[in-house]
Amino acid sequence: MINLQEQTAPLLLQVLHLKKSYHLRPVLRDLSFSLEQGERVALLGPSGCGKTTLLHCLGGIDRADEGSIEIQGVLLDRLSGKELTELRRRSLGMIFQFFHLLPTLSVFENIEFPLQLLGVGSSERHDRVMQLIEEVGLQSRWKALPAELSGGEMQRTAIARAIIHRPALLLADEPTGNLDSLTGEKILHLLEKLSQAYKIAMLMVTHSPQVADICHRVIKISDGVMIEESSEKIKSSDH
């Protein structure tokens, strides 16, 4: 007899029948999907279709009106505010289009900050941050403040900050949307490399099929509903 349970890959994220409205205007309409551990999925759709709202719900920034979100077997709507904060700090990383770096902190200090929140010792923090700074190519910029960085350097810093605590799930909202095409391409390659190296699952919001090319799977949504799902990697021009 076939054991179906043994054949099922472990789910990291499961979203069921998610609904969200603002001022009686539906933004997410009965959305359901899942992510496996280490899987990269692109959420593809035009501006205003509900992509960012979904990411905010997944990250615990906003609450859905109906439905459920389960991360590593934990239902978000059953968590207290303190428990949700703890889950975000340990299990989630977030990357934004506009970087959101702390302006008074250096590259090193911005990347180090999540480890400080988790109570990691100073010696381990230093070693992990410097290793990651080298991996993202910021060895010569680790003392610089955000205002002294280029857009690509700021996004590299933001990526390092998002994964320094080795989260299970990375949520990326248009991570190349504020960058020129060449810099954006380099950032995408970096995201792909780091997610593979650290076995981090990634849900990336984008309106660009080229950006989605680094993902294993693509979910297309329109007006808050899933209209298509593809397990084949989108093909674009060679990088």
Image (cartoon, rainbow, N blue to C red):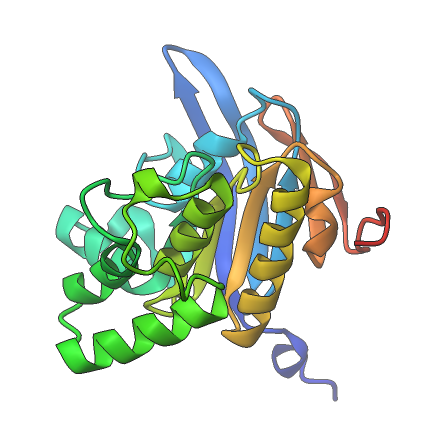
Q: Quadrant of residue 120?
A: bottom left
Q: Residue at x 51, y 28 (%)?
A: 28
- From this view, report whether residue 60 is shown above or below residue 189: above
Residue 121 in sight here: no
User: In the image, 182: left or right of 24?
Assistant: right
Q: Residue at x 67, y 38 (%)?
A: 181
Residue 196 in sight here: yes
Q: Position of residue 133 (x, y in %)?
A: 40, 67
The foreground one among 3 and 102 is: 102
Q: Residue at x 61, y 21 (%)?
A: 223
Q: Position of residue 150 (x, y in %)?
A: 45, 41
- From this view, report whether residue 120 is shown above or below residue 162: below
The foreground one among 214 and 71 is: 214
Q: Residue at x 14, y 76 (%)?
A: 122
Quadrant showing the C terminus: bottom right
User: In the image, 47: left or right of 92?
Assistant: right
User: In the image, 76: left or right of 224?
Assistant: left
Q: Quadrant of residue 89?
A: bottom left
Q: Position of residue 24 (x, y in %)?
A: 40, 11
